[in-house]
């Protein structure tokens, strides 16, 4: 299991029909790719919720189609720092996951995703598929995130069933909640997904094969349908 994600490959993966996956692993605002990813997130949250996003995940993953950005999501390994979404929880996320799932796990096996922004639900689903494959390849077992009803519908359409850890209560954020516009009117939930189970489900549905997913990183052991 790696504490830091692969940083050197661009694109990280390709799809059929001109889609590709890109990773920005640095936080320097002068990096052109990161600046583009952050601007995309900022614009989508402003347009959708009237929100002002001021904080971005340490690493950003983008989905592009024929040069045009379609979706972006942020990544934060849990081993490094407290997670943003743990503000909503009374106990650490890893403890709650163990209680809800009955599966033994360590904090370094968990990663938080956030800052998810997409032009359309289809782009979000494609990014979720790629993200599942990539995180499995990096050795993570659990992904935690805050999901709106629209995002959870994307998981349902992919036959993925994350565990509900509770409500994302904006009161836990204090004055920061004013920056989020109408986001919390969607009643988001804190969720956890077991990555090996999700990967197996997507493989069973031939999701990677149908998308023509070609990874340019070491394959997760279970992901036989997506060739390097």
Image (spheres, rainbow, N blue to C red):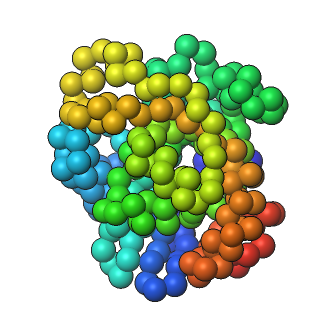
Between 49 and 26, the residue placed more toward the observer is: 49
Q: Residue 137's x, y, as percent?
A: 70, 59
Residue drawn 58% across and 60% down? 158
Q: Indicate the quadrant containing the C terminus: top left, top right, bottom left or bottom right.
A: bottom right
Q: Residue 124's x, y, as percent?
A: 43, 60
Residue drawn 47% across and 25% down? 167
Q: Residue 70's x, y, as percent?
A: 35, 67
Between 100 and 2, the residue placed more toward the observer is: 100
Q: Residue 123's x, y, as percent?
A: 41, 65
Between 134 and 193, the residue placed more toward the observer is: 193
Q: Considering only vertical position in the picture, is 105 above or below 170?
A: below
Q: Quadrant of residue 143?
A: top right
Q: Does any portion of residue 80 appear in the rendered image?
A: no
Q: Does any portion of residue 107 appear in the rendered image?
A: yes
Relative side of 128 to 40, left or right: right
Q: Quadrant of residue 210?
A: bottom right
Q: Quadrant of residue 176?
A: top left
Q: Considering only vertical position in the picture, is 215 above or below 25?
A: below
Residue drawn 69% across and 69% down? 205
The total of numbered circles placed on residues is 0
Residue drawn 47% across and 32% down? 189
Q: Considering only vertical position in the picture, is 227 above or below 166?
A: below
């Amino acid at each position: 299991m790696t504490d830091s994600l692969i940083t050197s490959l661009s694109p990280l993966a390709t799809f059929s029909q001109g889609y590709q996956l890109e990773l920005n692993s640095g936080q320097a605002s002068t990096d052109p790719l990161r600046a583009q990813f952050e601007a995309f997130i900022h614009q989508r949250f402003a347009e959708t919720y009237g929100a002002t996003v001021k904080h971005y995940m340490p690493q950003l993953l983008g989905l592009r189609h024929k040069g045009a950005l379609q979706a972006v999501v942020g990544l934060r390994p849990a081993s490094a720092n407290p997670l943003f979404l743990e503000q909503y929880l009374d106990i650490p996320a890893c403890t709650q996951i163990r209680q809800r799932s009955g599966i033994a796990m360590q904090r370094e096996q968990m990663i938080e995703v956030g800052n998810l922004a997409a032009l359309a639900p289809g782009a979000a689903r494609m990014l979720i598929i790629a993200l599942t494959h990539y995180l499995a390849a990096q050795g993570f077992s659990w992904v935690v995130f805050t999901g709106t009803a629209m995002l959870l519908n994307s998981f349902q359409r992919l036959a993925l069933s994350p565990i509900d850890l509770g409500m994302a209560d904006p009161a836990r954020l204090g004055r920061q909640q004013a920056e989020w516009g109408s986001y919390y009117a969607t009643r988001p939930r804190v969720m956890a997904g077991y990555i090996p189970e999700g990967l197996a489900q997507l493989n069973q549905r031939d999701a990677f094969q149908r998308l023509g997913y070609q990874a340019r990183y070491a394959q997760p052991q279970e992901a036989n349908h997506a060739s390097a």
